[in-house]
Image: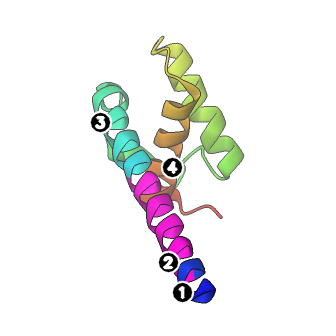
């Protein structure tokens, strides 16, 4: 019985964490489309001579854009945009 309860709890925790990640990615996509697309299109993320070549550089670039546009995002918003961009374009580990 304990094994069954442990398995159910583990499954519930994993499902909840995947839902949070999906929500963050969707939130990041919405923020990116609303704010970032006013300056550039998606081609900037996949061009051969792109500036962003690491996860640290991605974070720095998103924070730089957020500051330059005076968006006043919460840290969670910055993280969501980074997660969206990394998942969709960059694929950094």
Q: For residue 4, which numbered disc appears in the image? A: 1
Q: Are marks 1 and 3 in contact (CB under 8 Å)?
A: no
- Measure the C-alpha gap from mark 1 to mark 2: 6 Å
Task: Say few, some or many: other residues with alpha carbon within 10 Å of mark 4 (under 14 / 14 to 19 / 20 or more).
Answer: many
Closer to the chain start, of discs 2 and 4, is 2
Give the magenta part as a residue range: 7-22
Closer to the chain start, of discs 1 and 4, is 1
* Residue 71 location (% of width, % of height): 45, 15
Closer to the chain start, of discs 3 and 2, is 2
Label 2 element class: helix
- Residue drawn at x 51%, y 54% as measured from the top left: 86
Q: Which residue is mark 3?
A: 33
Magenta stretch encompasses residue 17: yes
- Measure the C-alpha gap from mark 4 to mark 3: 14 Å
Q: Are marks 2 and 4 in contact (CB under 8 Å)?
A: no
- Residue drawn at x 66%, y 50% as measured from the top left: 55
Q: Which residue is mark 4?
A: 83
Q: Which residue is mark 2?
A: 8
* Residue 10 location (% of width, % of height): 56, 74
Position of residue 87 relative to residue 85, above or below, is: below
Label 3 element class: helix
- Measure the C-alpha gap from mark 1 to mark 3: 43 Å
Q: If the image is split into quadrants, where does the C terminus sit?
A: bottom right
Residue 46 visible in the picture: no
* Residue 7 location (% of width, % of height): 55, 82
Label 4 element class: helix
Lateral position of residue 52 relative to residue 73, left or right: right
Label 1 element class: helix
**Residue 72 vs residue 7, the one in the foreground:** 7
The prevailing secondary structure element of the residues shown in magenta is helix
Closer to the chain start, of discs 4 and 3, is 3
Residue 68 visible in the picture: yes
């Amino acid at each position: 019985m304990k094994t069954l309860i442990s398995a159910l709890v583990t499954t519930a925790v994993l499902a909840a964490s995947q839902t949070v990640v999906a929500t963050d990615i969707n939130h990041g996509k919405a923020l990116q489309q609303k704010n970032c697309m006013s300056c550039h299109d998606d081609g900037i993320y996949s061009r051969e001579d792109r500036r962003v070549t690491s996860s640290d550089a991605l974070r720095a670039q998103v924070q730089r854009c957020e500051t330059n546009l005076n968006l006043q995002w919460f840290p969670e918003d910055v993280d969501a945009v980074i997660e969206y961009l990394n998942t969709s374009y960059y694929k950094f580990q």
